[in-house]
Image (tube, rainbow, N blue to C red):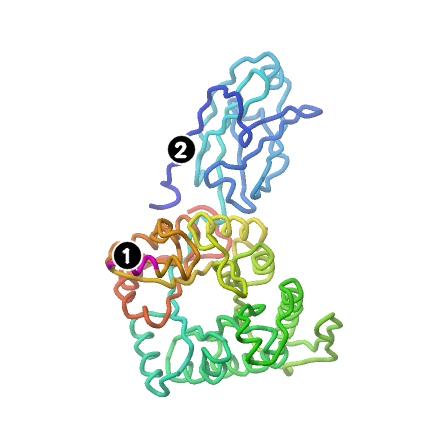
Amino acid sequence: MASSDRELPEISTRPQARAPNRCARVGGRGTVWLSLFGIPNIASCADASVGLRIAPEDQAEVLHEQVGLVGRVLVRFDRSILGALARGDPLAAPSKAAGGRCRALLAARSGPAVLTLEVAVRDHWSVPRPFRFGVMTGGPARGRLWLNSVLDWERLGYTSLLVTDHVDASAGLVASLAAAVSHTSRMIVGSLTAAIDFRHPVLLCKEMATLNRLWPGRIELGLGAGWSQRDYSQLGMKMDPFRCRLDRLREGVAIVRQLLGGAPLTFPGEHFDLQDASLGTSGAGAIPLILGGGGRQMLALAAAQADIVALNPQMLSTGPVWNSATLDSTRAKTRYVMTTAGERAAELELAIVIYHLFSQPTDEDVAFASRSLGIDTAAVADSPHCLFGDASAMATTLLARREDLNVSYVIVTDTSAEQLAPVISLLREQDSGMQWRPGKVGP
C-alpha cells in the first residue's frame, strides 16, 4: 500500500480520565504543549513537517516543527481558543489538511475540554527506496568455486557482496573483495564489518581506496567495534570493555571519513594519534560507509556518521541480547535511528540481515532460529531477521517490512541466496520504474 493511501486509526475524541501520551497542557502566554508520543507514524517520524489545522485555520500557528521519539509541537492559539478551553466548550471539527501524506486525529485533554486536532505529517519516509539485495559471505573457502557462486549471485539479481571479517570464520577480506569485484560486472563489494580493533583505519582506508580507484563506485566499507571474544583470543589481544571499543570506533570512523575526502589528516586522538596521514592527492572517491548495531550507542553513531545503517540484534561477547531481534525491538531501533539522525534521516539507507530463511519451517527450524537470535519461538515468524513462506509470501512480507521499518537493503547469508532469488524477481517487478530521490517529500 502506498504511503499516501495508508489509513491511520482515529484516536477517540471523547474525554478520558488519563491520556498520558496524548495530552495538552495550557502553558504561559497562550501556548499549549501537545505530546505526540504514541501516535502511529507520528512518533516515529524524524524531522517531520507538521501542519495543525483547526477551523478556522488561522487560529493556530506552529512554532516548533521537530517531532522526535518523544516529540512535542508547540502551538500558539488565539484567545478564543483558550477561552473555549477554559470554559470547556467543544471546539469546531478540524478541517481536512489537503496533501498530507498521513493523517491522524489527535485528541488532547486540557481540563474539562477535549482539543481535537488533525495532524498532517509529511515525513521523510513517505517515498521509500527501491529494494536492493546483498549476499553476506565468509569469502572463498572453496577457492575458485566460490567465484562461480559470486557470478551466480550477480545473475540472480544480487547487487552487493558483503564479506565478514573474523580470524578463522572468514577468508582474507581485501583479497576476497578484489577477487569478487574483478570477476563481476556490476556487483558492489564491501565489508560487513571490519573491526577497527584489528584493522588500523589508515591502512584499511588505503586498501579500500585502492579498490575504489580500480572499480569506482563499487565499494562499500562496513566498520565495527569488534564483538567476538574468539577473535581477540586468537590474535592474543585484550578485548577492552565496550565503551573503550566504541570510543576507538568513533575515532576510526572520523579518520576514515576525513581520509576518504582526500586531504592530509592530523588527528590527535586518544586511541589514534596521526600526523599528516594521507591517501594521496587523488583521494578515494565516494565510498558509502556501513555502520550497524543493536544498542543505542552504536545506533547513535551510525545515525550520525553512516550512509547505510544495519539494524542488528544487540550483541555481547557471549551472544545476542535477549529479545533484541524481535519486530518490536527493530521498530524501536528504526525510530531511534531516524530521530537521532535529524536532517540526515532523509539520506540514510536502512539494511537488515536475514539469518533464517525457510519455505516451510519445521519446529526444529523455529527452535534453532529462536536459540541463535535470542528470542521466543512465538516471536520468530515476525522477526525481521527471519523470512518464511513461498516466494509470494516472502515478497509480501518484505514489502510490509519496508513500509513498517523503512528497510530497503535486504542481506541474506550465502546459504540462502539461491532460495531468495524468485523473491528478488517479484520485488524488482514491483519496484520497476520507481525512482528514489533523497529528501523528497510528497508525491
What element does badge 1 sit on? Answer: helix
Question: Residue 182 lies in what quarter of the image?
Answer: bottom left
Name the mark nearer the viewer: 1 or 2: 1
Rendered view: 45 above or below 269? above
Picture coordinates of residue 155 (x, y %)?
Answer: 30, 74
Rendered view: 5 above or below 235? above
415 relative to 80 in the view: left or right: left
Picture coordinates of residue 239 (x, y %)?
Answer: 62, 71
What element does badge 2 sit on? Answer: loop
Please identify the dominant SS of the magenta region. Answer: helix
Q: Amino acid at mark 1?
A: Asp
Q: Is residue 365 magenta-colored? A: yes
244 relative to 2 in the view: left or right: right
What residue is pinned by disc 1?
A: 363
Rendered view: 109 above or below 225? above
Residue range highlighted in magenta:
360-367
Picture coordinates of residue 222 (x, y %)?
Answer: 52, 70
What residue is pinned by disc 2?
A: 9
Q: Amino acid at mark 2?
A: Pro
Q: Nearer the viewer, residue 112 or 293?
A: 293
Q: Nearer the viewer, residue 424 or 412?
A: 412
**Separation (CA) of disc 1 from disc 2:** 35 Å
